[in-house]
Image: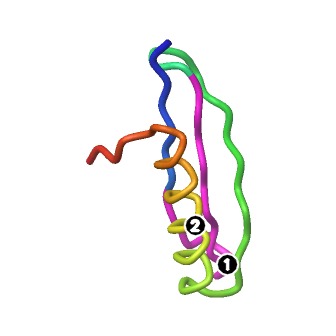
Amino acid sequence: MARFYRMDIQLDLFGEWRLVREWGRIGQAGQVRQAIYPSQAEARIALERHCRVKEKRGYVYVT
């Protein structure tokens, strides 16, 4: 089964940093989860932590 997992750090209109994660099957709408962080550095740390976990589960980084 072909799956995807997408992560992005975004600044919202209120000045909060969000780690946006989306996952699901390729070709279908995925699920989305957002986590709020007070700084970009903390959001970046969370993104890197999630990347390591996903790589251990077999996901491959694609640009």
| Residue at 62 percent of width and 83 percent of height | 42
Circles 1 and 2: CB atoms closer than 8 Å: no
Residue 2's mark? none
Asked which quadrant contains residue 50, the reply is bottom right
Q: Amino acid at mark 2?
A: Arg
| Near-viewer residue (19 or 57) | 57
Q: Main secondary structure of the magenta part?
A: strand
Report helix, strand or loop for mark 2. Answer: helix
**Residue 63 left/right relative to 18:** left
| Near-viewer residue (47 or 13) | 47
Mark closest to the chain's N terminus, 1 or 2 = 1
Would you call the spot at circle 1 few (<14 residues within 10 Å), some (14-19), or many (20 or more)?
Answer: some
Pointer 1 residue: 16
**Residue 38 left/right relative to 30:** right
| Residue at 53 percent of width and 47 percent of height | 54
**In the image, is residue 5 above or below residue 1?**
below
Identify the image's colour scheme: rainbow, by chain, secondary structure or one colour: rainbow
Q: Amino acid at mark 1?
A: Glu
**Residue 44 left/right relative to 21:** left
Marks counted in the figure total 2
Residue 49's mark? 2
**In the image, is residue 31 above or below residue 46?**
above
In magenta, the rendered stretch is 8-24
Q: CA distance from mark 1 to mark 2?
A: 19 Å
| Residue at 45 percent of width and 17 percent of height | 2
Asked which quadrant contains residue 29, the reply is top right
